[in-house]
Image (cartoon, rainbow, N blue to C red):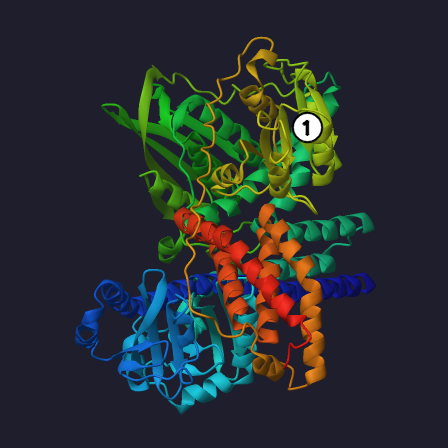
Amino acid sequence: MNNRKKMLLTILMMLFLIFLSGIFIQQRIVNMLNKAAEHSVARQTEDLSMLAGERFRRFLTPLQTAATHLSEHEEDKDDMLKMLVQQNPQGQAGLIDFQHHTRGRSVSSKSFPRLQLAFHGNTVIDYNPDIGILLATPVSYGDNVRYVLYQIYPISMLPQLFALSDYDAFTHVIIQYHDGTLAVPYENYTTEDTRFWADETIQSGMREVHSRLERNKAAAVYTEGAEGKYFVFGADLPQTDFSLIGYMPWSAVAGQIMSIYQRVFFLFALMLILFACLSIYLLMAQTSVAETEELRQARLAADAANLAKSQFLANMSHEIRTPLNAISGMNEMILRQQVPGEVRQYANNIKSATTALLTIINEILDFSKIESGHMEIVDTDYQLTNVLREVCTLVGVRAQAKSLLFKIHVDPYLPNGLYGDAGRLRQILINLLNNAIKYTPSGSITLDISGQRKENTLYLQAAVTDTGIGIREEDKDRLFHVFERLDIKRNCQIEGTGLGLAITYRLLNMMHGSIKVDSTYGEGSVFTIELPQEVHSFDPVGVFSLSAQPDLDKVLEHQASFIAPDAQVLIVDDNEMNCFVASSLLKETQVQTVIAHSGAETMEALQKQRFHVVLLDYMMPGMDGVETLHKAKELPNIGSTRFIALTATAISGSREKFLMEGFDNYLSKPMTGDDLTNMLLRYLPQELIQHPLPAPAAAPIAAPSPAKTAEQASTTVAPPAPPLIDYKLGLTYCNNMQAVYDKILAMFNKQSSDKIAQLDNDLAAANWKDYRINIHALKSTALTIGCRSLNQKAKDQEQAVKDYLAETAPPDQQQQAMDYIQQHHANVMDLYRQVAELAGSPAQTG
């Protein structure tokens, strides 16, 4: 009885731990999905900001066209004003000179302070909450600005002209001025909306949005409170003092997220049910059988193992593949040696176990690839008999373990040489056979291979027949659904993710195949697939027999395909065991290997000697593989060194990602000796290779074209500018405390030399991360002391850096941003020096 109580207590504790783990995992998944949704909404917000900017440009274009005309035909002032009103009747047009004489709609610089900037050659967009939006552009005569042409759009017309309510039905967007004043509301904006935006949860989300906008062009934040679940977002409108903010209901972007969330919840609930079934079975067995202490411990260990292998392997690919790489690599070295038969049997068991573990990981990863549309079908020439032999070898062991009779019938007249994805065919057959073995308590499993040939296409047919429990008629329609487990009460003790048949069904669809099921409940089932494959060799299969199995007692025949004693290879991995495996697998090639365990050690090794190939781990603490690669590329005489990424993250698109970062190729862990030697054979210089296989000729690398030098910007002669520092404005930022303001001006003057030097160094070193941080700080401090012009120029530089660093920016936009930064940096620094000198003068606040 005491033992039973202990077991019951243990089970309850484990259930409690599983429950807590489920809550934790559930929260992590929700957070992860919301982060992904935030990223998506942020990108949509960036599109909205571009759309808003385009609407402003739509009204600026005719204004700029008219200004260009007036530069050459001053006598047409009245005609141009009439034409502007005719083109945009909602806007009131006017013309103003330096003496503030106006023609047409009158305007005051007090109402629109930014209007003065137009007299310095700038296009201006300004806002007055009592009047509306002003668009202004300079009219130049030669190098001087003589007039400013403008149009004013009244408050009542702003929603009709500039609102973004037609973007979609769920997105609510506001355009506001820099001080937070509402400029352009969305359609049907009411006092309820004002209350919504005043909610503390929404305000907290917007504060986080503004914080992220310091580093990004657009940002979005998930909020949840009394108002409900929303994504709030915001973005600055370039070249203006406007920004847009808005919100979108969480349900509008949830979509597939809810579906994934429900699947994960179902998996966790199913795991609890399976564990409960096993627990009930153990308790019932305890009442009838007096288990020994050893048996009870073994049972608990088995329970823990079953629980461990159910923990979302898809999110742990890297952590699992890294040690698996070491295991399979050292096991391959054992199989290459002359060892006792018992040790060889253990090594073969290890090889089978690692293969099975990889199959489980890949099954979950395959489903995620299929769901995201990234699954790749790779067609190659293959021998049908080789695929069938591999399938029988893997499946036969499981059938034998359950005392099931496994039979295979192959049409001897089938062509043996086919063209298709042999790996996916093997996966489909193994999935069907494993499914039959799982649901067949006793009897037999039969695999029938046949087909019909039409010209050069073989319609390959495979039928898997079992004498298992069968499938009920009402369950057949759900057979290929994702995460579906049929007849759970009867099958609660049968392991599985519910993904195997779903993956099989989708793979067949991708390969233009089909599957059908015939089953009698309680008697057995027949799964039949048909898959079109091209024929590249009409030699028949002949008599196929299960007896043609590989000799497990035979030493693994392995001879290096080449030797290269003068080749220098650097192996970089933070895991010492992985380094040991890689260097050991390369011993037979006689290459000279050096080990490094971090990015810093890699840089030190590369500076000491020249390497032909660097095997570089992608994910390392501190300086990761990509950062290490980029720093290494800056070293002299590194151009001929080839960099191969080592990664345990096996996802679709890895090759393209690594090539884009600058790697020459990549290897996925766990890797075999053949994987390593084939990669080296491809990238080592041909003159270093000895014996029998020459390295393939490397594709020529095009020399980079010389960068084009940006033309110097012409200097514009402008009228006398207003004072650089607006001391009244600066005092307002210091709560009108003169002593504090004087100290701030003195600090601004004292720090200017170091700050300018830092910005110059950042520009010279292309250190855009620090350049953006420092120019952002200058923007803020310039406004704090009351210098609007330096604040605006620093803001424009910061925006250009954001444009250059934006992940979604096309190359031509990045080049334009880079040209802008380089052309305007010197002017901004000159202005910085002038303002700093003025800030340090004795009469600074006079």
Quadrant of residue 166 within the rendered picture? bottom left
In-front residue for pair 500/245: 245
* Mark 1 residue crowding within 10 angstroms, few (<14) / some (14–19) / many (20+): many
Give the answer, above or below, for where 428 lies relative to 753: above
Is residue 399 found left or right of 65 in the rendered image?
right
Residue 329 image position (x, y, % from top left): 67, 29
In-front residue for pair 195/756: 756
Residue 203 image position (x, y, % from top left): 54, 80
Look at the image and tell me in which quarter the C terminus lies: bottom right
Amino acid marked by disc 1: Leu
Give the answer, above or below, for where 761 lies relative to 783: above
Q: Which residue is mark 1?
A: 570
In-front residue for pair 343/683: 683
Total tally of numbered discs in the picture: 1
Is residue 612 found left or right of 542 in the rendered image?
right
| Residue at position x 61%, y 13% in the image | 688
Residue 53 image position (x, y, % from top left): 36, 66
Look at the image and tell me in which quarter the N terminus lies: bottom right
| Residue at position x 18%, y 71% in the image | 76
| Residue at position x 21%, y 65% in the image | 73
Badge 1 element: strand
| Residue at position x 46%, y 89% in the image | 195
Q: Is residue 371 visible?
A: no
